[in-house]
Every structure is written in C-alpha cells, then in structure tokens.
Amino acid sequence: MIKTISTTPYNDQKMGTAGLRKKSRVAMQPNYVENFMQSIFNTIGKLDDKTFLVGGDGRFYNDVAIQKIIKMAAANGVKKLVIGQNGFISTPAGSHVILKNKLDGGFVLSASHNPGGPDGDFGIKYSNQTGGQVPSSVTDKIYENTKSIREYKICDIADIDLSRLGRQNVCGMEIEIIDPVVDYVDMMQEIFDFPAIKKLFANGFTMCFDAMNAVTGPYAVRIFEELLGARKGSVVHARPLPDFGGLHPDPNLVYAKELVDLMFSDEAPDFGGANDGDGDRNMILGKKFFVTPSDSLAILTDNYNLIPAYKNGIYGVAKSAATSTAVSRVAKAHDIGYYEVPTGWKYFVNLMDSRRITFCGEESFGTGSAHIREKDGIWAILFWLNIIAATGKSVEEITVEHWKKYGRSYYMRFDFEGLDTAVQIMVQVDAYQTLNRPVIDTRWTRVITNYAMLYLRDLSNEADGYQFVTAKSQKDLKKGNYTAQTKIANSELNQYPELKYIPEGTHSLYCRAYKENSSHVMEYGEWSDGVPVTVKVKTPDAPVVQKVQVKKNDVRIVLNSKGEEPDGYDVVAARSKNGKEPSDYIKVKSGYSGSSKELILRGVPAGTWYIGVHAYKYLNGSNTKVLSKWAEVRKVTVKTSLVTGKPAVKSAKVSRQGTKRNVTVTFTVPKSCDGTDWVLAKKVSKSDNGSYTGVSSYAYTKKNQTKTTVVFKSVKPGVYYLAGRAYVKGYAKSYTKWSKIKKIVVK
C-alpha cells in the first residue's frame, strides 16, 4: 500500500562534492531522509524505466535509511533496485556495478572517512549513470526541491530481508540483491597481474592491510588472502562495524596509528596499506617508510606499463591543486597529458569522460583511474603490489629511485577539522582566486528604458570574459538568488557593456570575471560591489497557455486571448525544467505576431520536452525586446522519430597519395535525412546512446545530395573502426542509430 505523508522542509539539505553529509542525529530527525530522497525522485524525471543501485559502508543508521529508500523508490514508481547484500557496497564497487550493468545511477550511503556511530556522521551519495557524482546543475535543483517539499510517498510494508541473494518483488518494484564483492574482484583481476602478485606472496612476501572495521574488509580478505595467497590474518579490522569499532576510518598517519606503529617497528611486514570507511582512499607504507599521496600518484603513473590493463598506454594524468607537482614531471617525461583541477573528484571525472586522463589523485589520500568514476583504495594497493612483483624492489627502493630520477617534492599540508561551512568555503575560494575584482563606475552607469549601460574599471587581463547579473541585495547574491543577465567574452567587451531586458523595479547590478582553466573548469573572480538601478518600463504580461498538442513531430501551442496583446512571442522546447522555467533549450523560435493564438514548433525530435513561451514588446519602435515572465511550462512527449533506418557502408577502400593514405567510404543513406556523421576511430566504445570515442574525423552529406562518399585523408597506419549515422535537422538534430561497425586496416 502506497501512502502519501505530509512533511515540512529542512533548510540544510544542500549536497556538497560528496553528496549529503550530516551528523547521524541530524539524519535521524523525523522525515529527514525521506525529504531528501523524495526531492531526488521529484527532480530526476520519469522513474518507471530506471534502475538504481543501493548500498553503503555499513555505518550507523544505514540499515534504517536503506529500508526507507527501498520503500520510497517503490512508491515513486522506480522500475528496479540493485542492492548490495546486507546493504553493503564500497563506493568504488558501487561505481563499477553502475557502469557494468548500465544502471541509471545509485545511492551509496557513506560519510567516507568520517567517524560513525550515533554521534558520528551519516551521508548519502547520489551517483549518475557514469557511476560518478551528479553535476551541480542537478544537485542545485534537488536542493531547491528540499526547501519547498510538503509530502513524500512510501510503501507501507515490512522491512525487506537484505541477506537473501536473488530477485524479489517489493510493492510492484523488482529488487535484486547481489554479492557486492564478486563484480569488483573480477574487475581487479582484469586490470592487474594476479599470477605475478600471487607468486610474490608464495615467495614469502608479507603485508598488513588495515580495513579499519569498514566496508573493504570482505573485499580485502577475498583478494589478498584467498586469491593472492597472503597469509591468513594479513587483513586486520576486517569486519565492518556501524561505529567502525571506535576507529576514525581515515587512512593517514594519525588515525591509522596501529598500522603505522607496526610498520615502523622491528616486526614490520614488507608492505602496509589501509583504506577509509567507504573504500575510496588509501595509504601506502613500506618497512619504516611512508609514501605521500602525491609521490604515490607519480610512481603509479611512471610505472603504468607494468600493469596489464595499461601496457598499451594512458591518456594522461591529473592532480588536485592541493597536491604536489611530483606527477607533472612524470607526465612530461612520458609525453602524456597533464592537468591540475580544483578540489573535488567531479573535476577528474570530466577529464576521464573526455578521454584526457587515465590516472588522477589528490593529497587527501585519494587515487584512481578511469576504470570507474570514483577513487579506489584497493586498486591503489594492488597497483603497488603489481609494481613490487614486477620489479622485485621494496616500497622504499621504488620511491627513492623515483626521487633520484625525477627529484623530490617538498610541501606543507594543513588539515582543519571542525570548521563551519562558511569558513571552509572562504578558504577554498581564496585558494583559487586569481582574477581581479571589477569595479562598476557609478558615475558612468545609467539606465535607458529597460537596459543598463555600464562602465567598468579594474578589469583582469587574465579573464576570458565577464558575467553580469541583477540581484535584490548582496545577501541574495551570495545565496545565488540572482538573475543571470549575460556573459560577455573579453574579446567582445566594449567600454560600455549593456545589460538588456532588466525587468521593472529596483535592482542591484553586479559583475565578476571568469576564466576557463587548462582543465576546462570555469573559475570565477569576486563579485563587484552592487550598483542600484531602477527600471520603470513595464514588462508585458506572461502569456497563458491554453493547451499544447503533439502531431507527429510538430508541437502546437494554443494561447488564451486574455491580457494585453504583445508585439510577439518567443517559443522554446527544452530538455529539462528548472523550477518554473525551461532550461537547456536548443534554440528560440521568434517572430509570432501578438495577435497569434497558435504557435507551432516544427520538426521536434522524439523524446520528452518542456515547452516555454515568452511574450515580448519592442521599446519605442526599436528592435530591443522587453520580455515577460515564462508562461506555465508544459511537458510533452513526442513519439515519432524524424528519421528511420541508418546508413550502410557499401565499400571502404584504402589508397595511397604519395606517402599519405586515404580511406574512401561509399555508403547509402536513409530517405529524407539532412546529413550524416562518420567516424574513423582507433577505439570504439558503444554506449546506450550510440556514441563513439576516439573520433579522428567526420563528414556530412547535405539533403538530396547525390554524392554519398566521404574521404578520410592522411590516415596513419593502424587498425581503425568505421561507423556512420544520419540525422535530420528539424527544431533540433535527430539521429539514427550508428551503422554496423566496419574494421579498417591501414598498412
């Protein structure tokens, strides 16, 4: 039975870089977890075709929260949940399960390296289909929902037995309980040379791995003791406990004191390692020797060719800004990409998804690779063991030789605990502040009808451009309650930039510089002081949408005749909705007269769309528009595909032109397509949406063009994979599936 429960919002449910993290007693408040989960379900759209992972690190209150999530997912129409047995799964294992099984995301309950228990910490990470963190645009929408939520849905049923492996039905939803260790162990065996490491242990090599009474205990026992042959008892604190046995599960020299004391004693084994609460951090130790996280990243990168999964090469490596530059010298020596990003694993994920990096790491004992979209503690331990097995050298020998070859990086690290959020944010912002703070000169700033003309001083030569916004006050600005008016690139910035379409009323104008760094991450400078302006021009009334109809690929919007007649309308179709506004819309269709009561968007591709309509008036006969608020946004579904079929390769021939090789492809295309895209790729990775990686070139044919040939010029010798897809332009491009993949050998 599904119940709808009334609730009141909490104002502190904004997710950080690692999800929602709170004190356990905060999470235990009435409806706290329920509000947060319902806000996620309210935000992410259609649920009846979605499958999510659920699991956690076993900390206090996880068992209660997981039962709530199961019942709420069923009540909200989720298709299926995949759940780790007894509610357990490590963060890296969870990321792998999502990727391997092409799930739509997951909920991993963890507060990472923070203490557990009633007086400890509790957390929920929401991952997307990549197995990594959802972008800020999504978390911001979820947060907005948490501030206004008034009810949640839940199935009124008994708790589910999570110990029983297999499938069962819960309130109309399928759940599958899996062994959380199996898939992860299989992946590790595909990456590393297990026979070589097993031989290492067989020859008397010893280790101590401290699982810190956290989730990686069962993983470590299975891998190190059972599969690789480390002596029984090599894994200590192997049983996950709700309070981590009173330990602080942070693998560093302070909190892993028991392991550190052992490794610096005369009875030290050959190798020591530790993981944190959810298994994504690591610490590396040798006999009376500690490896810094930055040195570890550099050494792993330098020895990638010793690992079976990476022997053919890696794309590049990235580090957080707080991590030493040791790895930069390795990247230069190996001629691979090198990137530096702000603190936050999501920045690494962006680089992984764009095939710029394979390895990455941060000073807070996190190291990982593109095999998943989270950092991975056991992966780092196995990497070190694989290097030791391949070289026959100790941890200290490997590290000292690395210093001799590349030099040693010295740095200072300061850890602050117990700071309030405001201080933490201030520290982080100051650390990456590189751009000048602009000044809006009030002597030359003035309002003309509904737009403002500004004069700026103290501009930054480093800036790529400037963002201009309006807000009611500086307090609203800091909270993000502002209207983004425009961004102007530095190259297009004139002496008197203009802010257009400012609505009627009194506002404050603000400006800040922005820059895209080498890692394609946007960095912003400080906001200017606010300059108050008053706009007296009246904005038109928002249009009233009477109905929206879909006929094949045309969307018809019928307006109500009430209200003052505007000069015209702007219509958009958006992929998503943000509050009362459409977002991520493709393009604006303008020019309908104010007397029009029917607006039509033609050639809309199949899928779910959010239809938005602006009314506008022109100022004093000029071409400057004064925009109304959005009409109530309407959701529609277009079921008809604009183009069917897919291209087919008739022939693909390799020819020589001097020393160069060309690949000439002839093909057939579906009827009524506007063009085709073709890729010739070294690697092909076909996902659900039919995307390919490793694109070397593309070409297109125009509609009704008789020539159906594309030539890839100056192709280097090697093995390639060819594929193509057709498209129809319409309101937005609509693509066919990719053609059958054809292997091409260029000699």
Image (cartoon, rainbow, N blue to C red):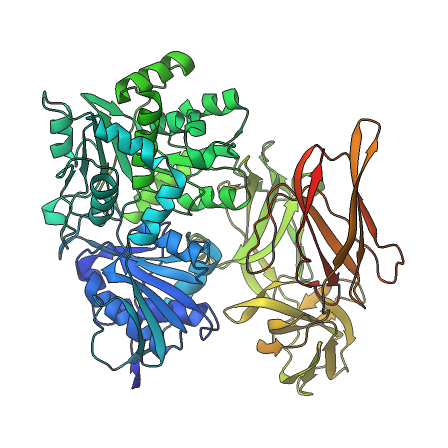
Q: Position of residue 32 (x, y in %)?
A: 26, 68
Q: Nearer the viewer, residue 6 or 591?
A: 6
Q: Position of residue 475 (x, y in %)?
A: 41, 55
Q: Is residue 8 visible?
A: no
Q: Position of residue 623 (x, y in %)?
A: 79, 63
**Residue drawn 41% across the image and 57% down it:** 98
Split into 4 quadrants, where in the image is the N terminus? bottom left
**Residue drawn 60% across the image and 58% down it:** 690
Q: Position of residue 139 (x, y in %)?
A: 42, 59
Q: Nearer the viewer, residue 574 or 63?
A: 63
Q: Nearer the viewer, residue 368 or 313?
A: 313
State the image quarter where residue 230 is shown: top left
User: Is residue 296 found left or right of 415 in the rendered image?
Assistant: right
- In this rendering, the answer to whether 10 lies above or below 741 is below
Q: Nearer the viewer, residue 554 or 445?
A: 554
State the image quarter where residue 724 is shown: bottom right
User: Is residue 334 found left or right of 617 in the rendered image?
Assistant: left
Farthest-out residue, top: 404
User: Is residue 622 found left or right of 151 in the rendered image?
Assistant: right
**Residue drawn 16% across the image and 26% down it:** 269
- In this rendering, the answer to whether 46 lies above or below 28 is below
Q: Is residue 310 visible?
A: yes
